[in-house]
Image (cartoon, rainbow, N blue to C red):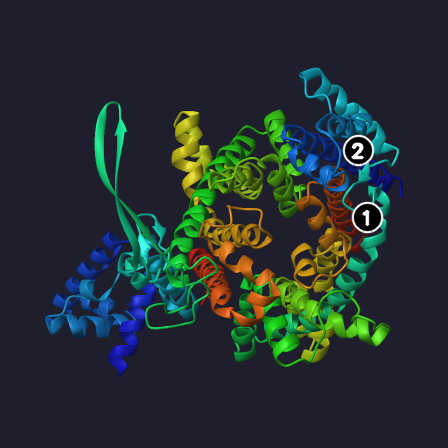
Amino acid sequence: MKEKKVKENLTEELAPETQANTAVETDVVAAEVAVETQVETVAAETATQETATETTATEEDIHGENLHDKVKVLSPGATVAKRFFRSKLSVIGLVTIILLFLFSFAGPLFSPWAANGGTVLDTNPDLIKEILATKPVSYTVDGVTYEALAVSARLPSVVKLGDISASHWMGTDVLGYDVLTRLMYGGRISLTIGFVVVILETIIGVIMGSLAGYFGKWVDSLIMRIVDVLSCIPSLPIMLILYSVFYNIKDVSKLYYMMMVLCLIGWVGTARLVRGQILSLREQEFMLAAKASGLSTASKMFKHLLPNVIPQLIVSMTLGLGNIILMEATLGFLGIGAPADTPTWGNLINLANEATYRQYYPNLWVGAGICITLAILAFNFVGDGLRDAFDPKMKR
Amino acid sequence: MGKYFKYIIKRLLFAILILFGVSVILYVLIRVSPNDAFADLIKTSHANSSDEELEQLLYDSLNPYGLYDKSFWGIIQGYFIWLGKFLTGDMGISYAYGKRPVSEVIGQYMWTSFGISFASLIIEMIIAIPLGIKCAVNQYGKLDYAATVLCMVGIAFPSFFLGNILIKWFAVDLGWFETGGLNSVGGGGFIDTLWHLVLPMFVLVVLNIGGLMRYTRTNTLEVLNADYIRTARAKGLSEGKVVYKHVFRNTMIPLVTQLTFTLPGLFGGAMITEQVFNLPGIGNIAYQGLFRGDIFLSMGYNMFLAVLTVIGVLLADIMYAVVDPRVKLTA
């Protein structure tokens, strides 16, 4: 019991040291053991004056265990990972995100209603087979006569607004598509858009922010005034204006264009963050050292300044992902994003606008709502967890 | 006072510069959009007109504001014509709302939004601020943990999803509340209106309370670590006195400034919530107008929001300087 406690003490003391230091100290202790076990000398006197901790450690060493194996030295990355996984909420968030990705990207592979890049209508197969009449016909094209069989058959009837059943776990929608499969394909678009927009925003934000922070003077004032202007533009109403800008585009590319404009407005947060960090980092000693070593501007910026901003960037990107997914969903809900037949989470929840569907067919839209909420919540949990994990001042 | 005056003037000039930038961006966006949405809107009220007549109508309505000429110089000239009109308070005519001036439409529906948002803000503050302080004082306690998780769930809930679920369950299935507009058909009166507002206000409170609570919590934690709190404790003050006299007052500094940022939300309306509950607030009106291609209303509403945002930021800076005398006035 006592031994264990002492071990903990040692670990705490040594943890911040580097591996090399630990090794050296172990050697010293070992040397002292050797002296102590011999006849009392002056050296042994000093050794006994050492703290109790070290004496216990030496005892352990005698039993053939090396202190080296007990002291775990963690790299900064491993420390962050350890802190991250210690928080329950972050783990829940991470698992949810992984599940949502599996659901969206792997799910359609197992769905019988998925077809090459889109969902298929549920048609009644018996009715397609019902051929009403056949009649042999012949016609001539470019001098060649073709013999053919004209078939008149009953049109396939589509199972519209089907109930929840064994073949449709969440029913079918207005057009006869399987809701669950649409939900999976919707996740593909919504999640992909989230990532692409956040990465683009971050790239622009980092470039602008580091330019402003590093060069200062007129570059800084110019960029910061642009940031001020852009941050005054309301994001949702501007989306409505963009709806009329891209009024004539009727396919899914409209959503991509709108999101691209969103990137051009949304980088300001990242730019502010990067600029602030660089302004404070620029004044620190290691930058003076970098300057004294005669490093180039690019090397100073990309090797010494930007790596120090990465923790905050990762946090803001994770939190930003939730926002972009919410934005896409909002556009879909308001009916101004992708065309109505494109499966996105936002478009699926759009049906809740109509009282009939809202009241009698909750299976059509509740699933999408839950997916959106889960995604936002999960990204927020992970973002918060990362922020705490990266913060060296956090004690918990 | 001279110091404040100079500072405020400087900030005002910056604000005007920012608004100028915003107006240029909005104007460019409006001009690069095809007039099709607007033409469709005009068509609805002149169903029997020929194509030439429609083109003439389009010209008559757009040209006075410099929005018709699509040539390069026309676009540049148009900006100044539009800006001139805007500065005199003429934001154009809203074709989606009975051909009334945009400023009149905004002025009329703004107050409904303000009433709803203001009431929700008060409720939020009453709940979030004491809760945030309590959570910070008992950091990592059970209450703190529960409140943090609940807040994050509240923040994550999309307003349209929450709103529609509430309508389905509480308004239709259970029949407890009325929804859709401010009054029931044939009904009226204050109680009736209040009954219609319970669910939308609940949505607004749930959405915003998380942010306010977490903000209060973070700030309280910072104050709790300050030296003067240690001094207060060292003097032997009771914990209640430390928290409610020393911590609380200092927490209010960032909170007061934070509240000025709610200005656009207060007057600009909550677009989605109002749309879901079909309330006649400015958010919903603007959405309907924008959706139908009413470009004058789009421009007017967006500029209105931008002005509110700029005023909010300006007020925050000034308030910060007034509330906290340690703040140096550097623009």
Element type where label 2 sits in the image: helix
Subunit bearing disc 1: B
Rate crowding at label 1 as few (under 14), some (14 to 19) or many (20 or more) other CA atoms within 10 Å: many
| Residue kind at label 1, given as amino acid type | Ile
Q: Verify CB contact (< 8 Å) between mark 1 and mark 2.
A: no
A220 is higher (above) or lower (below) than A192: above
Task: For residue B223, say whether it is visible.
Answer: no
Residue at position x 77%, y 64% in the image: B116
The residue nearer to you, when weighing A228 against A210, is A228
The residue nearer to you, when weighing B197 against A357, is A357
A166 is higher (above) or lower (below) than A255: below
Relative to B44, A206 lies left or right: left
**Rendered image: mark on residue B106:** 1
The residue nearer to you, when weighing B24 against A50, is B24
Residue at position x 73%, y 57% in the image: B259
Relative to B22, A209 lies left or right: left
The residue mark sitting in front, 1 or 2, is 1
Q: Residue A378 placed where, x, y %?
A: 44, 62
Residue bearing the label numbered 2: B13
Looking at the rendering, which quadrant does residue B13 occupy? Answer: top right
